[in-house]
Amino acid sequence: MKGKDSDRVKRAVEVAKQAHEGQTRKTGEPYIVHPLAVKKILEEWGMDEDTIIAGILHDTIEDTDLTLDDIKKEFGDSVAFLVDGVTKLSTARDGMRDIDTYLPATRDNFLRLMIALGDDIRVLIIKLADRLHNLRTLSALPPDKQKKIAKETLEIFAPLADRLNMGLLRVEMADLAFKYVNPKRFDELEKLIKKYNKSAEKSLQNTEDEVSRALKKEKIKFKISGRVKSVYSLHKKLAKHHQNMGEIYDLTALRIIVDDVTTCYLTLGIIHSLYTPMNGRIKDYIAMPKQNGYQSLHTTVITKDKHIVEFQIRTKEMHEYAERGLAASFYYNEQKLTENYKQGKIEHLPTNLLWITELQMTAAKLREGKKVDLKKLKLNLFADKIFVYTPKGDIIDLPTGALPLDFAYRLHSEIGDHVVGVLINGKMSNLNKKLEHGDVVEILTSKNQTPKQSWLEKIITPHARQKLRRALKLSDEPDPTIHKKKRKKST
Ligand code: MN
């Protein structure tokens, strides 16, 4: 694949070089460095030739004299279509960057984003590659832009990568962005992970050796390796578990890749015969894949030297899919998918990505000028999350079912503690009203207000609950670091 560009690809590079001649990036490099980096990323993801060519040309319509017609003539309809989609998407995103000043435009742009996306999911894949390279070179931008792009990445692009099960991309994007959004926290957690891994190193090696011996004895072919937890996912997990490190069981994980599904279960059995599995920590994502299609067996065990280790067991295909997601499906079904896209058919997408079909059908309706329920559409994209806005247009993401007090405490405990009322979409509302996707929420406060015990029933997020309990001077909830077997799963 690499180093063996087809004539079409070579030609695209020539065209892009000429078009961007004389332009430079904020880093000072010639502009062409960027499209070439996007090309490389798309190649690594195993994308088809049209997508790679469109990646090389993705900034030409917007930033150079090249026209869509030029591209159509030289590279065909499919490439032109993709470049056009990416251009539309970035116009939509430009609007999104100005979220602070003009809210209705945000919604409108989101709609355009959906329409552009609905045409061909490869548009989004090119956009993700574009964003990844921009993040890798984010240090060249002024600090306020860095923060905005990083925040938008955590709120929109990383969740999208997750929805497409592109695990490697999600991790890289989220960590790159988080470093800019909260540098102090990033350093802190990165150090913590390093320290923990160092202290667990020897024990982990012993466990790996022990498991390897047991698997070899059973004549199982396998690959085993350690996987390091990403900084951002640790940050998110800690937030969910009241900052309690004792609740994090997957800081160290060993990943075992075997040939087939039967061997996955056999391997799980062997591990459980060696170590004591922790109650409630066995997860069969093979029989019941995650919503994004992720498959694996997970188990957390206590090793002989009393360390807690998570095992992830999966086949090669599952592994590929977990790391590259939709891009991997393209790689495996390239011909089929590409052909179907050309013909406007989409039924060959893997079943776990059927939400894309739904998205495309909705987009088609929008293009015909029919009314659609946009709220429903957005919910599908971000599964269990809602996005609501502050009156200034900041986007706040909350779990589905969140209430006004969850929102208030998310903004600041000073706001949460003094709530007297809430305006939802400009109308007076009450504290029992569930927030909905796209709501504009304004919290009314008074200095004289004090937190009420009854508020505990008007809160669903652990974060808000903890803040409120603290304000009420209640003792913290039962120490979750004690792993009682009787303790029910809280989520
Ligand atoms: Mn670009």
Image (cartoon, helix red, strand yellow):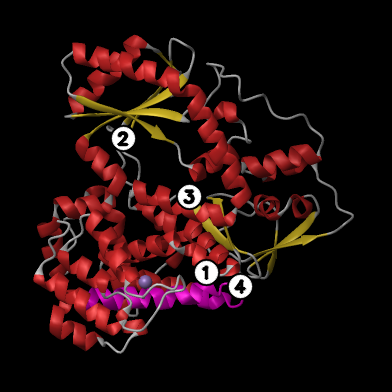
The Cα–Cα distance between marks 3 and 4, rounded to whole angstroms, is: 24 Å
SS at mark 4 in the image? loop
Going by the numbered disc 2, the residue's amino acid type is Met
Can residue 118 be found in the magenta stretch? no
SS at mark 3 in the image? helix
SS at mark 1 in the image? loop
Asked whether mark 4 lies closer than 8 Å to ligand 1, one says no
Q: Disc 4 marks which residue?
A: 100
Can residue 104 be found in the magenta stretch? yes
Q: Residues within 10 Å of mark 4 (few under 14, many from 20)?
A: some
| Eye-nearest disc, 4 or 1 | 1
Going by the numbered disc 1, the residue's amino acid type is Leu
The part of the chain drawn in magenta is: 80-106
Q: Disc 2 marks which residue?
A: 288
Q: Disc 3 marks which residue?
A: 175
Residue 32 appearing in the image: yes
Residue at position x 60%, y 52% in the image: 182
Work out whether residue 1 or residue 85 is closer to the camera in this orientation and state it: 1
The Cα–Cα distance between marks 2 and 4, rounded to whole angstroms, is: 41 Å
Q: Quadrant of residue 407?
A: bottom right
